[in-house]
Image (cartoon, rainbow, N blue to C red):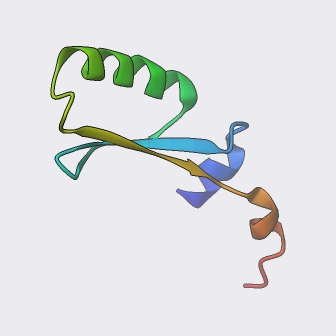
Amino acid sequence: MVKNLLLKKDPNTYHIYLRGEVLFKDLDQFEFDLIWGRLYHSYYKDELSYESIFYDNSILTDASY
């Protein structure tokens, strides 16, 4: 999974939660915009949340393992 994240040009990934449970994880910007727009405007507005995660690839290049 980490290898797949390193290959992504966009260092951000998104997770969408419903009532604290993960619905979607590791979405890119396009996927997030599409899914969030449809879910948030249609259903569960008060129970939906999301998290944006920024991966700093420079940390991984210095790894010594």
Asked if residue 36 is positioned above or below residue 7 in the image, the reply reads: above
**Residue at left 15%, top 28%?**
44
Q: Quadrant of the C terminus?
A: bottom right
Q: Position of residue 24 (x, y in %)?
A: 33, 40
Asked if residue 8 is positioned above or below residue 37 in the image, the reply reads: below
**Residue at left 47%, top 41%?**
14
Extreme residue toward the front, this view: 46
- The count of marks equals 0
Asked if residue 36 is positioned above or below residue 13 in the image, the reply reads: above
Q: Position of residue 1 (x, y in %)?
A: 52, 56
Would you say residue 25 is visible in this rendering?
no
Q: Position of residue 37 (x, y in %)?
A: 37, 17
Asked if residue 49 is positioned above or below residue 4 in the image, the reply reads: above
**Residue at left 38%, top 41%?**
50
Along the viewing direction, whichever of 41 and 54 lies nearer the viewer: 41
**Residue at left 73%, top 58%?**
56
Would you say residue 45 is visible in this rendering?
yes
